[in-house]
Image (tube, rainbow, N blue to C red):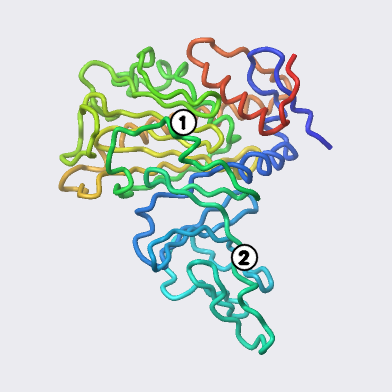
Amino acid sequence: MTPTVRPPGTAEALPREAYVSQENFERELERVFYSTWQYAGHVSELPAAGSFKRFAVGAADVLVVRAADGRINALHNVCRHRGSQLVSDDTGTCKRALTCHYHGWAYNHDGSLRGAPRMGDGFDKHQFGLRRAHIEIWNGCIFVHLGDGTPVPVRESLADVVWPYADLDRAKVAEIATYEVETNWKICWENALECYHCAINHPELVRVFDQDGDAGGADGGADYVYFVNPLLGDSLSVTRSGHLESKVLFECTTPVDEARGFFQWHTSTFEMVGSPDCIAVTSYTPLAPDRTRITQTFLVPEKAAAGKDYEPAVLFELHKLAREQDNQLCTSVQRGVRNPAYVPGPFNDIYEVENLRFLDVYWKLMADGPERA
């Protein structure tokens, strides 16, 4: 049965079923998360041959693995023999092979079957390599695509997004913060798309961020938004002070006072907030209709040393504080939309324009071009 979620007739938020329906949630996994590019990590998280990181969403489970030749592969985490999960750890290193604990089948880092004990002379191991997912690296960020066929390349989709940091692919992960929030993933994403709520709920952020600032950038149509992050006064970074809080900066291709990027890609629920001293990457993973995992990954220049060149508690503080404030807001919204009395209200036509763009993407993915009233 098709969910009763339908496109709004006016510029309104999604109806209640979109946030509470299990059926709609499962359809979203198929139409959105299994069918579009999703952020899986940064290349610096895979430093050596055999280094791996799991990317899991819904029932899908993929291992992102660096091979001996330096290439990074995306391999479905399921043995080709009886379907056992190969790896249960979120990160780690398998130096020689990915070996199934059930019957000992072992796979090379490119997914080819290395060995299958006692399968007999007639067994052709070349027919039983791990299934692969599409993978692409963009500015050091690893994206995987679980769908069949050949997806439009990330570099083509994001061709107009030119980051002002020449060495982003040589950055390193300084810290990862993970939150599990009792709310629907769309509530988290929709909250991230607007700053209508900022003045009331983010007093620390609005001391440095100019929510009315006019900044140029690349307009990706309905799919994404990218612009120079507008800050107030002489602020140069998204920190409590507004000052640069690291002695080591990214290699900027534009003047430091312009080297600020803000990027949101709707189909991937992927966000980057970049300053010359730190880049905060945020991704949203749906766990249930009313539960979402939010991951903040903080990138710094590869030569920046914690405790020497920067203090993590200072450099990442404002990003984390705003995230914790947003988590509380999103939880409150979920409680409200669960109420049978909830009906969607209108969007603000100045501060919530990006929410409308997201709706265009969402309905296209969910309903194959639904009719609009």
- Label drawn at residue 264: 1
Location of residue 68 (image quadrant): bottom left
- Decide if residue 294 is on the left or right side of residue 133: left
Measured as percent of width and height from the top left, residue 76 is found at: 59, 60
Location of residue 213 with respect to 167 vertically, above or below: above
**Upstream in the sequence, badge 2 or badge 1?**
2
Task: Count up the numbered dots.
Answer: 2
Residue 339, percent from left and from top: 69, 25
Specify the amino acid type for callout 1.
Answer: Gln
Question: Between residues 334 and 281, which one lies in front from this camera angle?
Answer: 281
Above or below, comparing residue 101 to residue 121 in the picture: above
The residue that disc 2 covers is: 78
The percent position of residue 268, horizontal first and vertical second, equals 53, 38
Residue 134 or 97: which is nearer the viewer? 134
Q: Amino acid at mark 2?
A: Val
Question: Secondary structure under badge 2?
Answer: loop
Residue shown at the point (48%, 68%) measured from the top left:
109
Q: Residue at x 34, y 19 (%)?
A: 206
Residue at the outermost right position = 1
> Would you call the spot at circle 2 few (<14 residues within 10 Å), some (14-19), or many (20 or more)?
some
Instruction: Report which quarter residue 257 is drawn in.
Output: top left
Residue displayed at 24% across by 37% down:
277
